[in-house]
């Protein structure tokens, strides 16, 4: 598979005034191949959503690069850049309640992006709205109704139709299931999986639920306090985590299967993620890591490949085991 998008030391800080800065995303590098789904996990405050928005140009980057099909994307998007990139990259938002304008009909919401195209005809808009609704399991008649007439799962389907009507190549799904009831989460994930195959989409799938991320993703990246701690094949990272943070994150994640959940040795993650304003020196996880060593508080571990493994880990435990 050839590379579609690559991040090189992508960084996004937010200035708070008085010299304080939130280090939301701090030097993140990875690539996603065409047709691949990369799952991105981590606690709230780890910078996952900011990474997704910076990658799409919704936030200006502070430093680093986003390279799409070999072309470096601008640090600051002008209106014509948004128009050009809306045809290839889209986002599906977390909250299907908040992300749909209650005063617009479903048809108007879904067609919003198309109206950016100056030469599109009204008849084409109607036909594409109908096709987008049917693609996500809704009906043409739903176009004249309003968002409040739909359930949470249906609203998320409307959000997906709005993103996919642009026929994008790459989609960032930002916690697309976390606001939904457990009973409809699997339906939305299965829909995204089917669409990925039928449309040949490449996805960055951001979520809390590690078992769902493992299910939908080819590879998985684990983020902590603005940095990637581990990245590898989803099954390897989920079933044989190497980084102490990944190990604790997975041990603290409830199993969807009640039988396996009973057998799980639950290990709640200790302490809270530190403030991204005061990023500690050395390893960012040192204050909560059960395996911390003196070197961890002094030297920042690099994200490096492990010998004989198809994964990268940022941890001094493996410093001698990198290839
Ligand atoms: Fe723990 Fe040290 Fe590894 Fe950080 S570098 S995860 S503190 S062992």
Image (cartoon, helix red, strand yellow):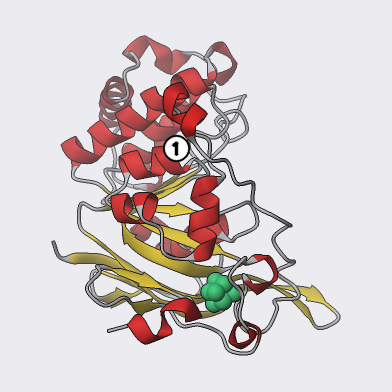
Viewer-proximal residue among 64 and 100: 64
Residue at the extreme left of the image, as rendered: 1
Question: Quadrant of the rendered structure where residue 292 is?
Answer: bottom right
Q: Is residue 311 above or below residue 146?
A: below
Q: Cβ(mark 1) to ligand 1 < 8 Å?
A: no
Dot 1: few (<14), some (14–19), or many (≥20) neighbours within 10 Å?
some
Is residue 264 something that shows in the picture? yes
Viewer-proximal residue among 255 and 87: 255
Considering the image in quadrants, where does the C terminus appear? Answer: bottom left
Q: Is residue 276 above or below residue 236?
A: below
Q: Is residue 306 left or right of residue 287?
A: left
Q: Residue at x 49, y 36 (%)?
A: 264
Q: Residue at x 65, y 57 (%)?
A: 45
Residue 32 spot, x, y in % from top left: 29, 62
Is residue 115 something that shows in the picture? no
Residue at the extreme right of the image, as rendered: 18
Q: Which residue is mark 1?
A: 112
Residue 98 spot, x, y in % from top left: 62, 33
Question: Quadrant of the rendered structure where residue 196 is?
Answer: top left
Considering the image in quadrants, where does the N terminus appear? Answer: bottom left
Residue 257 spot, x, y in % from top left: 42, 25
Q: Is residue 141 left or right of residue 177?
A: left
Q: Residue at x 58, y 89 (%)?
A: 299
Q: Residue at x 20, y 51 (%)?
A: 35
| Count of marks placed on residues | 1
Residue 171 spot, x, y in % from top left: 35, 49
Q: Is residue 23 left or right of residue 155?
A: right
Element type at marker 1?
loop
Q: Quadrant of ligand 1?
A: bottom right
Q: Is residue 81 above or below residue 210?
A: below
């Amino acid at each position: 598979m050839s590379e579609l998008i690559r991040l090189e030391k992508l960084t996004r800080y937010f200035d708070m005034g008085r010299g304080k800065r939130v280090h939301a995303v701090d030097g993140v590098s990875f690539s996603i191949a065409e047709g691949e789904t990369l799952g991105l996990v981590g606690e709230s405050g780890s910078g996952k959503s900011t990474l997704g928005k910076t990658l799409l140009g919704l936030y200006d980057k502070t430093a680093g690069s986003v390279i799409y099909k070999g072309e470096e994307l601008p640090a600051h998007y002008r209106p014509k850049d948004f128009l050009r990139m809306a045809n290839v990259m889209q986002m599906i938002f977390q909250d299907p309640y908040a992300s749909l304008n209650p005063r617009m009909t479903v048809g108007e919401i879904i067609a919003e992006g198309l109206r950016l195209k100056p030469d599109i005809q009204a008849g084409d808009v109607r036909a594409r709205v109908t096709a987008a609704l049917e693609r996500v399991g809704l009906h043409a008649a739903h176009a004249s109704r309003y968002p409040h007439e739909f359930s949470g799962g249906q609203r998320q389907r409307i959000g997906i139709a709005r993103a996919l009507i642009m026929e994008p190549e790459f989609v960032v799904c930002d916690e697309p299931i976390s606001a939904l009831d457990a009973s409809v989460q699997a339906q939305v994930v299965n829909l995204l999986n089917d669409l990925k195959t039928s449309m040949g989409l490449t996805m960055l799938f951001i979520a809390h639920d590690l078992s769902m991320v493992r299910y939908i993703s080819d590879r998985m990246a684990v983020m902590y306090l603005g940095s990637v701690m581990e990245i590898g094949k989803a099954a390897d990272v989920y079933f044989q985590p190497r980084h102490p943070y990944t190990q604790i994150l997975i041990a603290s994640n409830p199993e969807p299967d009640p039988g396996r959940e009973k057998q799980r040795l639950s290990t709640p993650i200790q302490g809270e993620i530190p403030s991204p304003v005061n990023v500690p020196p050395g390893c960012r996880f040192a204050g909560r890591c059960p395996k911390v060593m003196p070197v961890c508080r002094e030297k920042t571990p690099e994200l490096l490949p492990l010998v004989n493994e198809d994964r990268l880990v940022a941890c001094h435990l493996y410093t001698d085991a990198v290839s």
